Image (tube, rainbow, N blue to C red):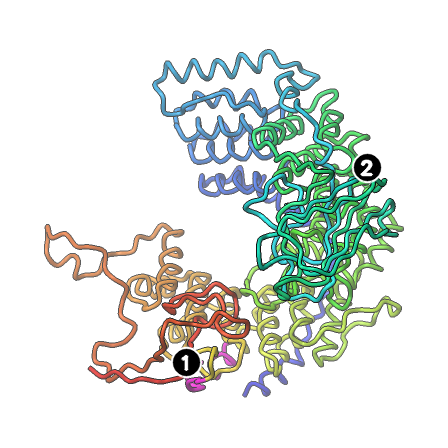
Amino acid sequence: MVNRLILCLLALCGAVAAAEPPALGPYERQVAEHVGKLADASPVVRGRAAEALGFLRAYRAEDALVVRLGDSAAEVRRAAALSLGWCGGRRAVAPLLEKLDDPDWLTRQAAHVALTNLTGMEMSFNALAPNAERQRQAQAWRDWWCQAPADAPPADVLALLAGPKSAVGQWAVTASSTYKGPPEVLVDGQLEPAYWQTKNVNPPQWCQLDFGAPLDLHQVTVHQYGPGFCMTEFELATSLDGERFEPVTRRKEKTPVELVVQFPVRKARYVRITSFGSERPTYPTTFREIEINGQRVTAVDASLTWRRERGVRALGALGGQGATEAILGVLGPNPAAKPDLRPMVRAGIRAVGRLREPIGFDYLVSLLDNPMWARNAADALGDFGDRRAVGPLLAAYARFAKQLDGKNPPDVPADDKMGFPSEDRMLETPYWIAYALCRLPLDDPRDRQRLRELSPQITANLPGDHDTFVLYQPEVGHLLTRHLLDQAGLRQEAAEQAFERLGQPRRAPNPEPSLAWSRFDARRISSWLPCVCTERDDLPRLLALLGHANGWVRINAAKALAWLGDERAVAPLADILAAAKSEGDHGYSRLFKDEEYNDPCPRWREALVRALGLVKATQYVELITRILDDEGSVLEVRHAAAQALADLGTPEALAVLRRAALEHPFGTVRHVARDALWTRGIEVAAPKADNASPGRRHEPSAAPGIFAADFDALVFVKGDNRMPNLPRTVEQADPWRQTYIVTDEGPCYRPGDNLYVLRP
C-alpha cells in the first residue's frame, strides 16, 4: 500500500516558481516580527515579544521597548525593562530610572537589574522596601546619572577598568589533545582543582606556552597530578618562532610530581613539554600548573575581572568619546584566554562591535585570525553592520568550518573541541560567522561569488542527527544555512545533491557543475532535507523517501514535509503511520545493552506522528489517540503523540489531552498534556474521586499504574547493582536503572539477560 501511495503521488508536481531570495535575513525577520507584536492586543503576546527582543539583543528595538515601559500590563513592563538590560543603551537609562517608582514591585526590580547592566554600577535598590527607603535609593541613582556627561563615558565607569595589567594574561596555551582542561588551566595560578589531561591517545602528547614575545628563560617547573600519573619519558624544548624547537633536555626516567628543569639562560617565546610515556599509559599527560623561572602565575582576582566585565559592558551600552579606546586598552591585541577572564573578554569584544567605531572595526577583523576569539569577533562584526566585514568573514569561515568530509578543521578552540564526532552540532566559530553574515549585506558580486564557492562547505556544517534528540522545528543552524544558500542561489542545488545521494532523480540542472559537494551517507545527508527543501515541487520525492530503507531518511523526509506544510502530504503520512507496526509488535530484545523491543533503530514513527500534528491533520485525531494509548508503543512515540495533539489543538484533541494529563502512565506525557492545556488557559480538573467527599482533604494523586489491575504476570530483567563502568558496557549508568547520563538511544540500560516472571 505504501508503494502504491508513493507511486501515485510521484505524479504530483505543482508548477510553483522558485522564490527570490528573501531581502531580510532570519535575524532581521524575527526582530521585525517581535517589534510588530509589541502592539498586539494581548498582553501575553506583547510580553513574550518584549522578552524575545532582549534575547535577540535587538539594539534597534530600544525605542520600541522604552515605549512598552508605559504599558498598561505589568508583565509587559517587566519584560521590557529586563530586555532593555540586554539591548538598551544611553536613551533607555532615564526611562528605566522612572520605573524605579513603578507600582509593580517586579517591574521596579527589573528596572534596577537593567540599570546595573547598562551602567556597570551596583548601587543598592530594594524593590520591596518601604516607600521612603525606595525613594532615597532611587534618588541616589538619579543623582548619579545627572552627573554623567552627555558625550563621554561616566568617570565611575572608566574607573571600573583600573587595576594592574598582568603580562601573563596574554599567554596562550595550546595542546596536542585535551581530555580534561582546557589547557589554559596550566597558567591560572592554581594547583587545584582544575588540571589538563590527555586520555586514550598515543604518545607523544604535548602542551605549549606562547608568551607573546621572547623572554629570558632559565627554569620550567611542571606540577603533575600526583603519584601514578607522572611522565616516564619527556622532552622540554623552546622556540622563537613556534616552528623550529630546540630541545633543552630529553629524559627517559620516572619523573617527580614536581618536575623542575633548570638550564642556562636562553631567549624563547615558546616552551613545549612533550610526553613520550607515563606511569598510566591511558593518560599520557596530567598536569596541574606550569611555572616559568620559578614564578607561578598570579591567580586571577575574581573581583577585578568582574569589575572590568561590568565596565566594558557599560562602555558598550553608554558609548561616548574614548569608549572604544578604553576597551581595547583592557583587551590588548591578543586577549587573554584563561577561563576566569573569558566572560570579561567576550563582553569587551561585543561592546566594541556595538560601538561601531573605525578603530574597533580594524581590531575585530584582526581577531578573525585568532582561533580562540574569532567566533566572538564574528558576532561583534555582525552587530557592527559594516559590509566590509563580509570578505574577511568568508575567508575565516573557510578556515574554521568543518571540511566537505565532515572532519573538524585544524584550528578548533580547545573549549569547543569534542572527544567524539561533532556531526550533531555546528562548531561555534562557523556558527557565529554564519550568524554575522546573515546580518550583513551580501549584494556585492565578489562576495556573492565567494559565497557560492563556499556553499558546499556551509551545507556540510549543518548539524545532523548523530547521538542527538530530534527537534521538529527549524533550528538556528537551519535558518542561517538556508539564508546563505538562498543568497548564493544554491539552496535548490543542495537539495538536488541530497536527493541524488538518496536515490531520487534530479529535478533541476546543476548551476555550478565545477563545485564539489559532500558525499555523506544516507543517514547524514538526509538531515539536509528539512533545511533546503522549501519548494512544493519537492513533495513527490519527499513522499518517496518515506519508504527508504534507512529510518533516519524517513525521519528527515517527514520533518521536511512537516515544515513544507503542503496538505497533499497528509493522507500519505497518515496511511503509512496506520500501516506501521508498533515497537512492541517486533518482540522483546534480549541483547545486552539493547533497547527493550527488537524494533529497528531509529524509531521513525515518532516523525510521522509529529508531522501530522505540524501540518494540522485534524481529521486524524483518532489515529494519534490510538498511538497515545497503545501499550505496544514506546515512550518517545507516545510522547510525540501528545505533542501532535497539542499542535492540532482541536476540541477533540484537547479532550484527549485532558484525560492524558490525569491518567497517562508516563509522567512526561502527562506533563506535555498539562502544558498544552495550561498555555490555552484550561485548568486540569481533579479526578472525580477527589470530589466525592466534601470537606475531605486529598493528597496529590500518585503516578498512574503502568498496567491494568487484573494483570497476569510481570516479566522483568534481574541483575545486581555491581554494574561495570568500562567502555562499551554500561558506562555512566544509574545502578538503580531509572536513568542514565550518556545520550545513546533507548529509554534505559538493561544489564543482564535473565528474564524473571512474577505472578500475583
Amino acid on which the number 1 mark rests in the picture:
Gly
* Left-right relation of 336 to 301: right
The part of the chain drawn in magenta is 574-590
Q: Is 560 one of the magenta-colored residues?
A: no
Residue 686 against residue 268 in the figure, above or below: below
Residue 528 against residue 109 in the figure, above or below: below
Residue beneath the point at 28% across and 64% down? 703
Q: Nearer the viewer, residue 378 or 38?
A: 378
Mark identifier at residue 215:
2
At which x and y percent is residue 18?
74, 63
Residue beneath the point at 61% across and 80% down? 550
Mark sitting earlier along the chain (1/2)? 2
The quarter of the picture where residue 157 lies is top right
* Left-right relation of 662 to 481: left
Q: Is 587 one of the magenta-colored residues?
A: yes
At which x and y percent is residue 375?
71, 47
| Neighbourhood count class around disc 2 (C-alpha, 10 Å): few under 14, some 14–19, many 20 upward | some
Q: Nearer the viewer, residue 755 or 72?
A: 755
Q: Nearer the viewer, residue 598 or 195?
A: 195
The C terminus - image quarter: bottom left
At which x and y percent is residue 327?
71, 28
Label 2: which secondary element: strand
Label 1: which secondary element: loop
The N terminus - image quarter: bottom right
Amino acid on which the number 2 mark rests in the picture:
Leu
What residue did someone put label 1 on? 752
Question: Does residue 79 appear anywhere in the picture?
Answer: yes
